[in-house]
Image: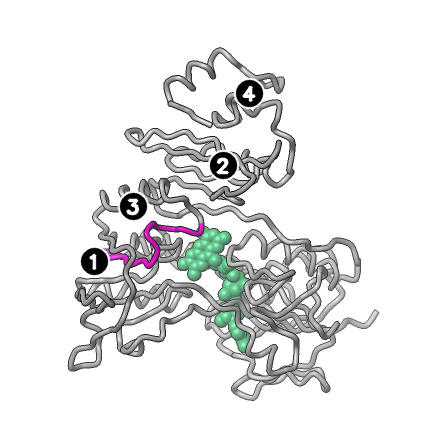
């Protein structure tokens, strides 16, 4: 059978995972060409944080080097950004004029960090945190400068702040909400996290709105001013205030986009020859910013590209961990609770442990753990599988270890533990 031509735009985690799956299940179906705007082969973007923290190197985080593409006869164009899709002639055109024809096109263009539209945003020393280039820029800045200010106290901002601190900078994190990681933690867990990070030397300004970035005579940032008039010195400003799906290319080709390239459950766009996966996608109204859902999309997409026609992507329940060595937190589902829900909370502030489980009827719908996350994956499993927890409700907060191997509960031990830990429901 004559091979079809598959072109992939975007050489990141979601796209390459799709190719890995496809090569595994249908190695002979396509001649594959890949365009990546970055000059690197496929690396583990998640692990940029340990690189910044000095715990790993760029070489450690490569997932597939250039040889991998060669081994699978994939034509790889690195450092080439696709500027246009000609759907009529089924052609992609790169900024430098390179073209490739396709029978199937896979868009995996990821997302771009959002830059606050404040005066001074274009000064030297203001960067986002997305790729190897940003990471190297931060490492260099840490060697030459003293003060860093990170705008955004979410997962990315805190990992950047931790890395810069470990590289010797004096780091302040500014966050608009009143507690850290408000999209993953409730206020109690957020405050425990803040305390741990303060103990490591990070400074925090919460509830602050950035008004202006002030530069020096050389055009480099020297301070950040807030709307209450406070001014904080900074020669490096990292903006970690959110991401936007990269849809410009798809939109210019007339594909339907709405805060992401809109796809159906087989990851097909409005044009059935064109598929999309990863952070660039809007699936059933959600654009995901974590790897696990993107890998689920990749498996489904590969299956349909292989013409097997099995499997649908129906959306994902997500969970989060922070990659700051020595800090354990886990969050999943509807951890804030709300109307019609019940909460089981175990709080031991002196021991630095906080656990909150959110129940609706006999189902676990959310979990927020700080300090002791051993049972995070077990709770996540219960949550995803929507299993009834009515039989184990009283001991649920003590985790999987609280249940006998037979599935029976170990009531004696647990009653003691409950008394000691001050569990309340
Ligand atoms: C520092 C950091 C830490 C993170 N930590 C975690 C974590 O702990 N857990 C987690 O689940 N997620 C984490 N994430 C998020 C995770 O990395 C992303 O969800 C994932 O990498 C997105 O994969 P993607 O393939 O959709 O996009 P990307 O990996 O961004 O790949 C998209 C690629 O497409 C390229 N591209 C875009 N447009 C074009 C074009 N027109 N032509 C050619 N190429 C193009 C881009 O340059 C990019 O290389 C982290 C992200 C960062 C930055």
Q: Is mark 4 within 8 Å of ligand 1?
A: no
Most frequent secondary structure within the magenta stretch: loop
Q: Nearer the viewer, residue 395 or 308?
A: 395
Q: Secondary structure at mark 1?
A: loop
Residue at the spot of label 1: 169
Measured from the top left, where is residue 349 in percent x and y?
A: 31, 32
Residue at the spot of label 2: 376
Image point (52%, 79%), residue name: 81
Residue at the spot of label 4: 403
In whole angstroms, how far apart are the C-alphas of marks 3 and 4? Answer: 33 Å
* Sequence-earlier tag: 3 or 4: 3
Q: Is 4 placed above or below 171 here?
A: below
| Mark 3 or 1, closer to the camera | 3
* Sequence-earlier tag: 1 or 2: 1
| Mark 1 or 2, closer to the camera | 2
Q: Is residue 278 magenta?
A: no
Q: Secondary structure at mark 4?
A: loop
Q: Nearer the viewer, residue 59 or 400?
A: 400
Measured from the top left, where is residue 374 in percent x and y?
A: 46, 32
Q: Is residue 61 something one can see in this rendering?
A: no
Residue at the spot of label 3: 194
């Amino acid at each position: 059978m004559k091979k079809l031509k598959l072109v992939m735009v975007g050489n990141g985690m979601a796209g390459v995972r799709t190719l890995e799956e496809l090569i595994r299940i249908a190695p002979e179906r396509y001649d594959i060409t890949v365009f990546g705007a970055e000059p690197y082969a496929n690396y583990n973007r998640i692990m940029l944080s340990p690189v910044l923290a000095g715990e790993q190197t760029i070489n450690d985080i490569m997932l597939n080097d250039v040889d991998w593409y060669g081994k699978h006869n994939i034509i790889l164009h690195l450092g080439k950004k696709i500027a246009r899709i000609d759907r009529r002639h089924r052609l992609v055109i790169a900024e430098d004029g390179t073209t490739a024809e396709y029978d199937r096109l896979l868009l995996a263009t990821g997302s771009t960090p959002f830059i606050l539209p404040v005066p001074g945003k274009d000064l030297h020393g203001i960067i986002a945190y997305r790729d190897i280039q940003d990471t190297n820029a931060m490492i260099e800045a840490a060697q030459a400068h003293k003060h860093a200010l990170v705008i955004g106290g979410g997962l990315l901002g805190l990992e950047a702040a931790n890395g810069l601190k470990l590289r010797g900078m004096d780091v302040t994190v500014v966050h608009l909400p009143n507690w850290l990681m408000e999209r993953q933690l409730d206020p109690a867990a957020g405050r425990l996290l803040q305390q741990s990070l303060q103990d490591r030397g990070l400074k925090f300004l919460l509830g602050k709105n950035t008004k202006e970035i002030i530069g020096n005579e050389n055009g480099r940032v020297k301070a950040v001013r807030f709307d209450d008039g406070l001014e904080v010195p900074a020669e490096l400003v990292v903006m970690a205030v959110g991401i936007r799906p990269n849809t410009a290319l798809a939109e210019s080709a007339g594909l339907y986009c709405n805060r992401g390239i809109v796809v159906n459950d087989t990851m097909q766009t409005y044009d059935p020859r064109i598929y999309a996966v990863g952070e660039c996608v809007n699936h059933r109204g959600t654009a995901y910013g974590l790897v696990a859902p993107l890998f689920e999309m990749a498996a489904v997409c590969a299956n349909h590209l292989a013409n097997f026609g099995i499997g649908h992507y129906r959306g994902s329940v997500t969970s989060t961990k922070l990659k700051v060595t020595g800090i354990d937190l886990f969050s999943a589902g509807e951890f804030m609770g709300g109307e019609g829900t019940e909460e089981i909370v175990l709080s031991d502030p002196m021991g630095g442990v906080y656990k909150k489980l959110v129940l609706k009827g006999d189902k676990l719908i959310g979990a927020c753990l700080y300090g002791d996350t051993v049972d995070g994956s077990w709770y996540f499993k219960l949550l995803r599988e929507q299993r009834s927890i009515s039989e184990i409700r009283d001991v649920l907060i003590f985790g999987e270890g609280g249940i006998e191997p037979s599935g029976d509960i170990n009531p004696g031990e647990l009653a003691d533990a409950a008394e000691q830990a001050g569990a309340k429901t």
